[in-house]
Image: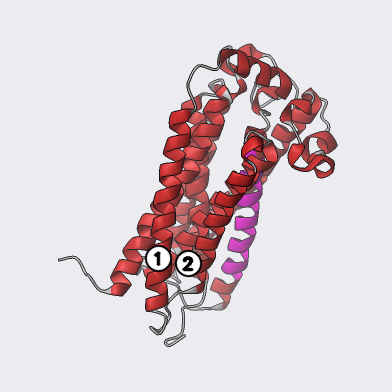
Amino acid sequence: MRNKSKPARFFRTAMAAAFFALAAVIFGAYVRLSEAELGCPNGPACAGKPLTPSAVQAAVNAQQKSPRAWKDMVTRYIAGALGLMLMRLAVLGWQLRRRAGQQVLIPLITLVLVFSLTAVSVFTLDLQSKPLVMMIQFLGSLLVLTLLWWIVLREQRLFRSVAGTPLVRALRRRALAALFFGLLALTLGAWSNVNYAGPACPDFPTCQGEYWPTVDFADGLLRWNDEGLTFDRTELDLPGAAAIHLAHRAAALIALLYLGWLSLHVLRVGIQESVCRYGLLLLVMLSFATALGIIEAVSGLSLLAAVGHSAAAAFLLLTLVTLYHVLRAPRASGK
């Protein structure tokens, strides 16, 4: 029989909200990638030719086939369901505020964050296709997902925190570093997507037939500093777009090496602390994200592979958050 107590309802609501937040992240990736036609409307890997964001934008505008209305409607339904669940979660958290270890602040912060993102969408309605606005929405939805997963982790009993031994404390610091590298690669990947930078490097592992083509990192990564929300991807030239995509590849390689080492390290030393299974989980998720990223590149920026890569990256982030949660010291009773 299903438990109908308020703590159980709080946990189930948090789980449902996390699911819808994950759906928002994945569907948002699908909308961005499909609206861009992956930047390759003329065939696999843009027929092997590097394209500037302005050329991609022109081709997409000329060949746009699928109406956007249904995508906007689905996005609103997901956001509306998530908002309702967050309001319920905040109310349940407040009702249980006197229970030991109950969470009140994080659900409220998450609720405010979601409504803030909604307000940003309303006030930037005419700028929805601008890269900076899309990045704000992406990073905000990613933060919402992470916060909700953190609530779930603190309420569930499967992934238990382990004692704070010297080994665990050392692993905790390394897990934080892994989170940083993972977020860096994920953020640069999103910046590449919203700028249609993928077609600038239509080959793999090289880019434009070279391992280090002509690039302009200042144009690709810093130009928006001076232009703000009016920054337009079509203003980037080929070296700027290539710089964005190469930065993502470099960050992904660093993340692959560090997270791969960490997963094997946890597998090797974690037996005595019963955390080796998390090393295996990290290794599996890292393998999926890496494999789908490579498949996306060699398959000519396939939409299915690209969305799968984005979903795998989100699951990898949740795995890193889970690993850090497990390596935190257990909560003391009554706190």
Q: Locate residue 6 relative to residue 88 in the image: left or right.
A: left
Which of the two residues, 219 or 104, is positioned nearer the viewer here?
104
Residue 112 part of the magenta-drawn span: no
Amino acid type at mark 1: Leu
Query: Which residue, as the protein is rendered here, is positioned at the far left?
Result: 1
Disc number at residue 199? none
Q: In the structure shown, which secondary structural element does the residue marked by tag 1 occupy?
A: helix
Circle 1 sits on which residue?
89
Residues packed near mark 2 inside 10 Å, few (<14), some (14 to 19) or many (20 plus) = many
Q: Is residue 291 visible?
A: no
Tell me the CA gap for discs 1 and 2: 6 Å
Q: Which residues are magenta?
A: 170-190
**Residue 255 position (above or below residue 115):** above
Which of the two residues, 276 or 121, is positioned nearer the viewer here?
121
Residues packed near mark 1 inside 10 Å, few (<14), some (14 to 19) or many (20 plus) = many
Q: x and y percent of residue 335 in the render?
A: 47, 85
Q: x and y percent of residue 155 in the render?
A: 38, 70
Q: x and y percent of residue 177 in the render?
A: 64, 59
Q: Locate residue 44 relative to residue 311 in the image: left or right.
A: right
Circle 2 sits on which residue?
107
Q: The N terminus is located in which quarter?
A: bottom left
